[in-house]
Amino acid sequence: MKTIQGNLIGSGLRFAIAVSRFNELITGRLLDGAVDVLTRHDVRHQDIEIYWTPGAWELPLIVKELALSGKYDAIVAVGAVIQGDTPHFDYVCAEASKGLSHVSLEQRVPVGFGVLTCSNLEQALVRAGSKAGNKGADAALAALETANLLREARKTTKGEDN
Ligand code: INI
């Protein structure tokens, strides 16, 4: 039996973080969590690039462009969609999540999903560095682990490890 896992060693890896300005009170904290977790796992500051989008809706397009550049080992998408009085929330959530998933699969680049989809501001605050941790940090850590796992999977599938 062979078990393959991605490690959490970030040295030498390059990351982009796409973060939406909408609900910046929340997204700024998610961004801080993502940068903090990456640098604590030895990703160098100069290997992290941050792109601000207007809202979560715009995240997939920018993440796609970043993925196509081939410059990054992984990308972290950070946003906060908070329910209002209209169905707008549902459209933004659905397209952001679907779009980010498509980019990751089509471009074969890990995309950490750090987009909160909350019923109210309090739920978002709880997930942006308080009681429920920091979902930006969680997404960055998952992206790091997946980047390293992908590297291992590519070695194995190319027969380098046999
Ligand atoms: N964008 C968000 O990131 N979060 C939200 O909660 C939100 N709401 O509720 O409207 C939101 N809307 C803006 C959207 O992402 C686009 O930027 C906008 O529609 C322009 O294309």
Image (cartoon, rainbow, N blue to C red):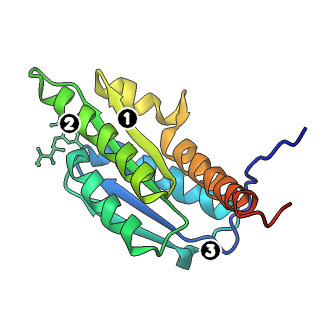
- Which residue matches tag 1? 116
Disc 1 to disc 2: CB gap under 8 Å: no
Residue 43 is situated, as x and y percent measured from the top left of the image, at 64, 68
User: From the viewer's perspective, is residue 103 above or below residue 88?
Assistant: below
The one nearer the camera, 41 or 12, is 12
- Callout 2 environment at 10 Å: few (<14), some (14 to 19), or many (20+)? some
Residue type, numbered disc 2? Val
Residue 9 is situated, as x and y percent measured from the top left of the image, at 74, 61
Q: Name the mark nearer the viewer: 2 or 3.
A: 2
Q: Quadrant of the C terminus?
A: bottom right
Callout 1 secondary element:
strand
- Callout 1 environment at 10 Å: few (<14), some (14 to 19), or many (20+)? many
Residue type, numbered disc 1? Leu
- Which residue matches tag 2? 92
Mark before the other along the chain sequence, 2 or 3: 3
User: From the viewer's perspective, is residue 23 above or below residue 68?
Assistant: above
Identified at 55% across, 51% down, the residue is: 140
Task: State the mark number for residue 44.
Answer: 3
Decide if residue 78 is on the left or right side of residue 13.
left
- Callout 3 environment at 10 Å: few (<14), some (14 to 19), or many (20+)? some
